[in-house]
Image (tube, rainbow, N blue to C red):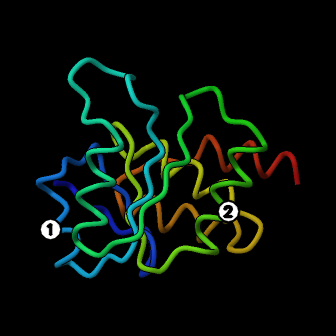
């Protein structure tokens, strides 16, 4: 597992497996949030397998899947709702963690500002400078 802390309440990871879930629970996470559609890659662990393991470990779980380049306003709103409703801390996962970091940056930009988003994401090893530049131009 490659857990990367963005904030005290939100971390990201590349694809996880059911075998990873007990360690995720032991690390103190209370929610697993999947941002990866099933069937994206051959041999990918299905969401239901992770969800079953999460529930068995006492974790909340939710899936807000989207493919790169196919982010809609509905997905953004669903992700915002998940962050607002689910117990923290949250571990979000996708193929590499980048997609989770990108949507988090998008929904947190107005609250935190460009500098804080870039600090948090770069500290976790993700470069969101292109996205933040686009958001800066929009503002």
Is residue 121 shown above or below 65? below
Instruction: Measure the C-alpha gap from mark 1 to mark 2.
Output: 26 Å
Could you tell me which quadrant the N terminus lies in?
Answer: bottom left
Which residue is depicted at the point 76% across and 49% down? Answer: 135
Q: Which residue is mark 1?
A: 22
Residue found 65% across the figure and 27% down from its top: 70
Going 43% across and 49% down the picture, which residue do you hit?
34
- Report the residue at 41% width, 70% height from top: 60
Give the farthest residue toward the right: 139
Residue 125, image x, y percentages: 34, 54
Residue that carries the numbered disc 2 in the rendered image: 80
Image vertical order of residue 73 relative to residue 7, above or below: above
> Which one is in front, 6 or 44?
44
Looking at the image, is mark 1 or mark 2 nearer the viewer? 1
Q: What SS does tag 2 mark?
A: helix
Give the SS element for disc 1: helix
Image coords of residue 72 (percent x, y): 74, 37
Instruction: Determine the image quadrant of residue 112.
Output: bottom right
Q: Nearer the viewer, residue 74 or 50?
A: 50
Quarter of the image that includes the C terminus? bottom right
How many marks the image carries: the answer is 2
Q: Looking at this view, is 137 or 111 the one in front?
A: 111
């Amino acid at each position: 597992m490659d857990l990367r802390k963005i904030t005290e309440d939100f971390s990201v990871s590349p694809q996880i497996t059911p075998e990873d879930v007990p360690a995720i629970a032991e690390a103190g996470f209370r929610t697993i949030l999947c941002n990866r559609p099933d069937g994206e890659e051959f041999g990918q662990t299905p969401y239901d397998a992770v969800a079953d393991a999460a529930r068995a470990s006492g974790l909340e779980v939710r899936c807000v899947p989207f493919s790169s380049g196919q982010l809609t306003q509905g997905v953004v709103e669903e992700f915002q709702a998940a962050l607002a409703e689910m117990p923290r801390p949250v571990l979000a996962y996708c193929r590499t963690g980048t997609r989770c970091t990108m949507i988090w940056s998008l929904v947190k930009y107005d609250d935190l500002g460009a500098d804080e988003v870039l600090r948090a994401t770069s500290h976790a090893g993700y470069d969101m400078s292109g996205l933040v530049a686009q958001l800066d131009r929009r503002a």
